[in-house]
Image (cartoon, rainbow, N blue to C red):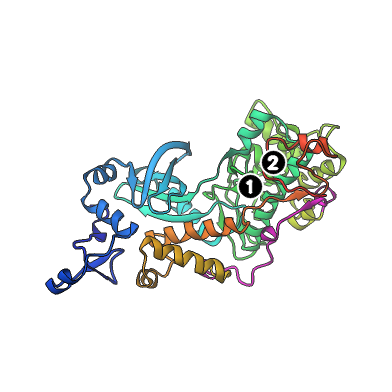
Amino acid sequence: MPGGQYQVTSTRFHHSVYSLTDSSVASNEDEEAEAPPPLTPLQKLTIDLCKDEKTIKELIIGRRVGFYKVRGEIGYGTFSRVKLAFNALTKDKVALKILEKARLDSQAHRLLSREISSMESLQHPNVIRLYEVLETPSRLYLVLEYAGGGDLHNKICNEGKQSDNASKIIFAQILSAIKYMHNLNIIHRDLKAENVLFTCSGCVKVADFGFSTRVSNRNVILDTFCGSPPYAAPELFRDECYLGPPVDVWAMGVLLFFMVTGTMPFRAETMGKLRRNIIEGCYTVPPWVSGPCQRLIKGILKPAPMERYAVDQMLGCDWLLPVELPWSLVTPEPSSSLRGLLDSECRNLEEEEDVRILLEELGFTAEHLQNNRLKDNRSPVTGVYRILLHQAQKKRGCDSLPVVRGMVRDPKREGLRAYRGLRHTSKFCVLS
């Protein structure tokens, strides 16, 4: 039975090396001398997982998985469904990606393994976090950060084209995420508006790493056609081997065009015509798009991969010059592409100490943390730790938005026009 390994059998607790809860040893003398200590949230939860009929029923029917209470569906993919859930200890909302094992062939298993591997390596404000992986006899669950603000595709479909400044804010965050991934030699290969999510405060989160791959260096040749055809680079339609970074760059060009015009650059009634348009680079930028943005789009959407802008060229372009990125979005070249998750998570010792205090308040002991090491993504201790760490990082401004110099938030002040273009986005900084 799920949760059985965490069973609690008495009210006098001593920490066990093998259990999330505590083993029981009590003497009559101790019982007479003192009242039992109050149960911690962790002890209460693990008792419920073992003995509470309602909780056990929820586990059986799929309304609860591990430490997570499962709610309604919020999305779906080719092999998966995504449901809203929340951690019963921290109360944080998460996105639960559910995969039916029976539907996963060998290729799908390989893609899933790559997705998990890529996400384990990524910890960036503009990349969706992986907290935990759970498994039952019939299903696999990826516990992911919950964005909650919808995706870029629906945003544009509902609101239309974005203002020049709003597009800069969004694009700068996507670009920061892609630069970070490429620095770690991870290629996304499925960038599209549906995979660009927003938090409720407007922070961008690049998601869905099902087609991602890690290469030994950025000059490694790839040969698998990945992604959505409207975002696919010309070299993919030519059935050529290709370099990974220029493919992601091309997709960013399509995203940028979509943001500033409200339409896709390459449109056709048939796949054959779409293929031809992309290979030939047939698109037209509307004249009302600003000159610097037009130059950026044209620098990206070049049919020849070697002529396409590199990520660093995009970061230094005229259009993005007014954008100021928070310190947390400026990602230096890593000293090692294989650095461990724990090393990156422990960089801020103050955050680490805050998280350990919260873990202790929930009932996790030093022994629990020592035994789990906080590396195993299939450990519930790791899941809670990562959620609390992310919570602490957000409090310190991890999800801060870039700002555009000259933007103001008060419509009565100068710069009213820039404000109106961003009226649907919250928490922009005011620059005097």
Drawn side of residue 90 relative to residue 200, left or right: left
On the image, numbered disc 1 is attached to which residue?
203
Q: In the picture, residue 200 is in which quadrant? A: top right
What crowding class fits label 1: few (fewer than 14 Cα within 10 Å), some (14-19), or many (20 or more)?
Answer: many
Membership of 344 in magenta stretch: yes
Q: Residue shown at 85%/44% (left/top)?
A: 292
Q: Nearer the viewer, residue 293 or 383?
A: 383
Q: Residue shown at 74%/41% (left/top)?
A: 167
Residue range in magenta is 317-345
User: Residue 340 location in percent, x, y?
Assistant: 52, 69
The first of marks 1 and 2 along the sequence is: 1
State the SS at label 1.
loop
Q: Nearer the viewer, residue 327 or 277?
A: 327
Q: Residue shown at 43%/66% (left/top)?
A: 374
The circle drawn on residue 370 is none
User: Residue 323 location in percent, x, y?
Assistant: 78, 51
Q: Amino acid at mark 2?
A: Leu
Above or below for 128 versus 341? above
Q: Amino acid at mark 1?
A: Cys
Above or below for 263 versus 110? above
Distance between mark 1 and mark 2 Cα atoms? 16 Å
On the image, numbered disc 2 is attached to which residue?
255
Above or below for 197 versus 120? above
The single residue placed furthest to the top in the displayed view is 269
Q: In the picture, residue 60 is in which quadrant? A: top left
The reply to whether callout 1 and callout 2 are in contact (CB within 8 Å) is: no
